[in-house]
Structures are given as C-alpha cells and as structure tokens.
Image (cartoon, rainbow, N blue to C red):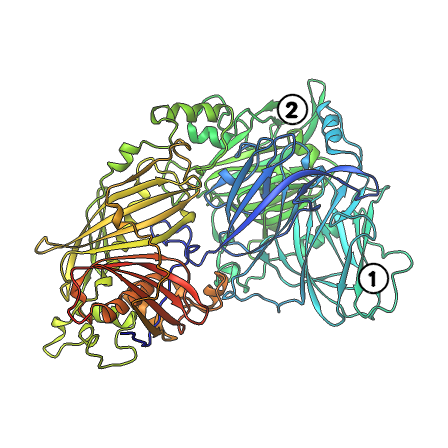
Amino acid sequence: MLLHLAGKTAVLCTFLCLTFSILSTVKAEDPYKFFNWNVTYGFIYPLGVRQQGILINGQFPGPDIHSVTNDNLIINVFNSLDEPFLLSWNGIQQRRNSFEDGVFGTTCPIPPGKNFTYILQVKDQIGSFYYFPSLGFHKAAGAFGGIRILSRPRIPVPFADPAGDYTILIGDWYKTNHTNLKAILDRGRKLPSPDGILINGRGSNGYYLTVEQGKTYRLRISNVGLQNSLNFRIQNHKMKLVEVEGTHTLQSTYSSLDVHVGQSYSVLFTADQPGQDYYIVVTSRFTAPVVLNATGILHYSNSAGSVSGPFPGGPTTQIDWSLNQARSIRTNLTASGPRPNPQGSYHYGMINTTRTIVVANSAGQVNGKQRYGVNSVSFIAPDTPMKLADYFKIQGVFKENSISDRPYGGGLYLDTSVLTVPYRAFVEIVFQNNEDIVQSWHLDGYSFFVVGMDGGQWTTASRNGYNLRDAVSRCTTQVYPKAWTAIYIPLDNVGMWNLRTEFWARQYLGQQFYLRVYTDSNSLRDEFPIPKNALLCVRARIEFSKETSMADSSRFDHDLFLAHKFPEVSLLYLSMKSRQGSRLITSYTYTERDAAIYALGVGACCRDAIDSDELKYVYHENGQQFVQVLPTFAALFSLGSLTNGIIDLPGLQFDPRLLLHGQQYIQIYKPFPSNASLINKVSLAGLHDKGKAAILELETKSYEKESGELLCMNRSTIYLRGAGGFSNSSHPYSYSNYPKNQVPAVKIPKSQPFAVFEDCTQPSQALLYRLSGDYNPLHSDPMIAKVAGFSRPILHGLCTLGFAVRAIIKCICRGDANIVKTISGRFLLHVYPGETLITEMWLDGLRVVYQTKVKERNRAVLSGFVDLHRLTSSL
C-alpha cells in the first residue's frame, strides 16, 4: 500500500560542521571556502621589460580572496618554484593560531615541489587586507593579492552598497629580478631606488576601470610595494574614506590619500563628473627630487573623450600635510564592526596600560655589511621557526627577551630577537624614528589603536596629546622622519607575532623582531594545538620524530587512544552544569512535554490532528504521562556526550574547525518511558585512517538513572578532515568494535520501492524542531543562513531523520513504533522548511532500506536502514 501524506525534513549537509559549544571555535554558520593555488615562475612585463615573476595560478597579481566574517579559508598552496616559499596574510589576525601566520618565525617553508594547506579563519574581522610572499625577496616578484572580508548580512554597514567593489594594489617596483635584488642585499649593500610604480600589476595607463555615470563605487587600496609611501588620487573626483584595515572610519572626504607601505584603505567615490575618461594617479611621497608616478584610466561608460594633458599634481615632500591627514582618520564610534555592537563600545582610553615598550629603528654596519635593527638588535632567523621551538620546547633556538623593551643607544649586533609579554596585558608601544625616512610598522596577529603621532622625541608628557576616544584601530602605522607614533594594544591573542618594518629591504636585513604573547594555560580557549598538517623542519622534525618513535611514526598511540575512558555523564534537559575534578557533569531530564514537542517537531499530526497512528505521541486520553515516545527521540541523548568528550581524547590531533557529523546509528533496547532522567556511558567504537581524513565513531549508551536499565545506544560518526595519514598508507589503520551489518552505509535497490511516503514540511518546521534543544541560528536566522551559503534557514539533519523513521513506522510498522529495533541514517544534503519529502522504502526480511528525497529538487538528502523485531501481520 502506498501512502502520500504531508511532512518535512532536513539533513545535515556533509559540509556543515558539528557544533561543539565547549570549543567556541567554529559554529555551523561559519562556512568554508576552498582554494587551490599553484605557485610558479613566469615572465611578466609590468614596466615594459621582461622579468621573472612569481605567479599564482598563472596570475600576476594573484587572485583576490573574497570572504565574510568568520569564514574558514582552506588554501592549498603548491610550490612549483625551485626554492622554499611561504605566504603570509597581512592583517588576518589568526586568532589563537600563529602557526598559520606564514612567516618564518612561525611556519616552516613549503619545500620545492611540495604543498601546504593553510587553514585560516577570519574570526571577528571585516575589511580590506592583502597576502604576500614572506620569504627572501619574493615580494619583489609578485605572488601578492587582495583579501576582502565583508560584514555578515545581519550586521549593518554605515554606507549603502556600492555599484562595484574593486581591489587596487599599488606599489613601487624594480625592473631587476628578485634574485638579483636579494644578491645585492646578501652582499651587504643597499638597493638602488625603485624604477617605477604599478597599479594592479601594470605600469602607466595599463589599468582601466569602467564606471557608470551617477553611481558610487568602492576601492580597496593596498600599498603592497617595497619601501615608498604613495599618494593616490582620481582626477576631478573626491574620495570618502570609509574603512581602514578592518575599522569603519569617520567618513571624511579627501582629494588625495597617502597610503604608506603595507597599509590598506577603503574609499567610496561617485562618478559625478561629465562623461569622459579621467586619470587615476599614484605618485611616490618623500622621494624628491625624483618622483615616481603611474597612471590608470577611469573610463565612464558614456565617455565622450579620452584623457588628455598632464595628470593632476599632488603632494610630494610635505610632511605636515601627511601628518594632519593621518590625524584626521578616526574611528566611527557608532558604526558596527564585525559584531553588532558599536565600535565605540570598547573604551580603550579608560584602561590603564601595564607596560610601555619603546621601539627605535636604526641602520648600521655589522661585520662590514649593511644591516638594520630594532633597539640595536638586527634580527637573524634561526634554523627552526621560534613558534615550533616554543611548542616542542627545543632549547637553543631563541632566548626570551633577547631584545630590550627600550633603546639603549649601543651599536648594532645580530641575534634572534624575541620579546615575551604576558597574555591579556594592555601595553603601550612607542615607535621612535630618529632617521630621515618615513617608517611603516606592522604587527601580525593584532589590530592596535594609533593614539598619537608627532615630531621630535617621545616623552611621558607626550601622552597629554593622545587621542583616547576615537583613535583608528589598524595593523600598520607610519612614523614620520624624526618623529614618533604611539599605539595601545590589548594582548588578547596568544602566539608568536612578527613586528616588522614594511620597508622590505630593511626587514630582510634585520629590522624586525617577534612578540611572544605567552600564557601557562594549555586551554583551547587560549590557543589551538599545532595543526595536524604542520610542516616540520630541522630541529622541529627531529623533536617530533623523537616524540613519535614509540608509535610507529603515528601521531598517537592507538591502544592508549582506544582505551580512553570517558566520564559518565548524566544529561538533564535543564542543562545544570558543574565540574567535579576532571569530570564534566551535565544534568538533563526529559518530560512528557519534551517528548510531545519533539513529535510535533518531526511532523507528527502535521496534516491530520486526529491521526490515530500519531496522536498517541502528543496526547493520551488517560493523561500526558501515558504518551508514547518516538524512537528517534533517542538521537537527542548523545549530543551532550559529543560536546563534552571529544576534546580530551589522548593524542588525537585535529583542527576543531573541520569536524563533520556524517552518520547516526541508534539501537533501541526497550520502549522509552514518557519521562526519564538518564546516565550516558560513552566509549570509542571506531577509528579509521582515510588518508586525508580520520573517521571517529563515538558510542553512547543511555541508562535510566533510577532503574539502571539500558534504554538505547547511539553511535555517531564524525569526520575529522585533515586528521588522516596517521598510519602506514599501504596498510591504513582501521578499528571498529561492532558488527559489519551495523555499518550505516547501504546500497539503494534499483527495484520499485515497497512503499513510498510523501510529507510536506511546514515553513515553520525548523522553528518548531529547535524547541527540542538545537538552537543553532542556521535553522532560524535568515541572515545567518545567507552567510552560510543558503537562500534561507535549513532544517535540522536529525529532524529529517525523524521524518524518515516516522514514514517507516506508518507504512511498514502500521503505526507500532515498538517494533523498531535499530535505526541508521547517513546525512547527504540540506532541506529547506516547506519542501516536500519523499521517503522510499524497500523491505529486505526484517530490514527496511530507505532513501529520502526532496521532491522539488529531486535530490537525495538521507539514506539508511531500519531493522525491525518483527513484521506486522497486515503486511
């Protein structure tokens, strides 16, 4: 007999993360973006002369990265060069994860012919940034590109959406190959002045931007050059500054803008001039008598004529003009940042600083060669990244506080300079520039408040002129000649962070050091563990080999891992949490009301309120204490066990941002009472090395607290992407403690199904199901859903499972839920509330094989099987 009713379901998409509240790292609404980049040499002609460039996927500059706040960026970089290579991410804060920063102090280089996959999260960030190659002098050959982080749709932005949004990468450039430039520096000599300026990789009149008259556009301008400050302007057009390196600014209007090396700005301009072409102009600052320049073309779509005559002039050597402009750039206190709260809600000016660090740049000779330094120390890179040495506790790589926090006036000397500062300190850093150049300083891992800048020597009295209300927060700041700049910074990001000049030849010859933000805590809340795929070099590789020699080159001891005992966890719906030693106790009880709400959430009585097969799940004539409980209600019992237990598994190394809940298996031992308090006992049921991923299976047995009787068992299959490869590839490790016939994957028959059940889910289905305890906003908040890549909120995966099993109970069990013995489901695709679900069923002895599809899209969203104790006599 074929039945067609109404109902609705959803499935956990294979690309949605399992949410673990104990981690607070990545939530299901944080989507993933995947990039595959091949880094190669190639001939380029940016200034009309052929030279060897570094390309990404054949592009110069490299491809833009477009993302949204909290996105996870999975960037696989293959190094096809003949030398080691690294990419760094200017302005991306790498929260709790300096291992991924991509500078030599934190990350081993990618060897030639090898790849490395960066796993970045743009956590709580918005704005305009860029990436670049950090090793050697690669930056003089290309491999840089823009990064934009858009606000989540739910977060208001203080200006209307522009008609277009464009990345503008400007920078000075040499005609000489980067290898020759590096050789000059290695011989201890200074570089000559750059030969020209590029706009998006092209020289004068090579860049062309078409606009429509009357519309407003956004330009994200980054100075990716090697040493010079640059001035940017558009002929006859005003620019409104709206954002600086992740901070929405007061919307001041400028006719030209100084962009110092390493800095990024966002401006809006309106195409409000007569329809013709106009110059886009970039000129060097403070380089007189030689002023470098490059022009591009702003082309109106209705243009009546091309550009003609000289391009408009701009400032050249005026320091005061630039200083006054810098001081005018302030934070928009009422605008939201990456979160809904206003940017001005953090009152940095009311916090007492705990330490003052004064940083002075200098130049000199060491052993007859040109070097540059900070507080008299010229940085030399060790053979092993300091962050890895810190992690593996390798002695002799660096010494803490090998650089003073004040200049002492001595001559330059070489050292691996590291300054240790405590986690959660609030420090003042003063950049003192006693030279005749404009400096530009950048700090990885942070955004800081630029509270003051002025000429002369900084003294404590200089604080009287600080801006303690609306100073701009950014990651790169300029320091004018014979002047100082002061910043405030809350040290809330544990790690090893590079503080460097953006004058690239100076950086290469030692004008940098590392700020070691340190805590004794080993909590994931403070810092992530080393990535599973981390490259290991020199002493880090040796140390790692020592640590793993007893485990057959495995990352962990299988026997120890599988012998791990979880604490018993009592789960109560009221979520009363307490800690007893290392044991996390979470109280959970369910009542008749919870069982009834769950039944409604998975579609019971949805179409027919008096359906005799389903009314018993929500109502009983003798009282609610007699209502029956659907067998899939058991799936709720294991969620707390997953949340509380997986983090402490011994030796397992994985990135918590790459977790996927793929399958669920439930075994029913007795009908569920209408109310109960439960005790869960959790154990490891399986572990499998799949090369690129590890598959972990957790088994949760649920007992009645009062009687001690076993009610059910849940087995949850979790995919840990990036955690595979821990065993011999020719004999990959695989362990499971359950029979093969319980494996959830099934083959769907090609024959006609025995029964088909059609159910129309309600538009509010997810809102109803969430009352059973899964309050993930992905299933309720339209803006969150859009950020995650869905057109609207999706249905919960376990809700879909409930719909499918309900269909089997109705069609095969003839309404008798007590004959359900086991339930297996594999999540395939998402479902939108309001879509129609079609569950197809094939009978194979006492096993029902099923597949659930979305009718409107004709896509399978769930598959699995249900085993029965017996068949009903009416079949």
Residue at image point 48% right, 67% down: 783
Q: What amino acid is labelled 2 in the image? A: Leu
Q: Is residue 329 left or right of residue 612?
A: right
Residue nearest the viewer, comparing 52 with 321: 52
Q: Residue at x 40, y 37 (%)?
A: 519
- SS class of the residue under badge 1? strand
Q: Position of residue 118 (x, y in %)?
A: 52, 42
Residue 795 visible in the displayed image: no
- Residue 760, relative to residue 784: is it above or below? below
Residue 650: where, in percent of width, then height?
31, 36
Q: Amino acid at mark 1?
A: Tyr
Residue 523 x, y percent position in the rendering: 36, 41
Residue found at x 80% / y 63%: 299
Q: Between 86 and 187, which is closer to the camera in this rendering?
A: 86
Residue in view at x 55 percent, y 57 percent: 469
Left/right placement of residue 222 relative to residue 689 reads right
Q: Name the quadrant of the N terminus.
A: bottom left
Q: Is residue 70 visible?
A: yes
The numbered disc on residue 278 is 1
Quarter of the figure that contains the C terminus: bottom left
Query: To which quarter of the image does residue 428 belong?
Result: top right
**Label disc, if present, on residue 412 of the rendered structure:** 2
Nearer the observer, 866 or 567: 866
Query: Mark 2 vs mark 1: which is more N-terminal?
Result: 1
Q: Residues within 10 Å of mark 2 (few under 14, many from 20)?
A: some
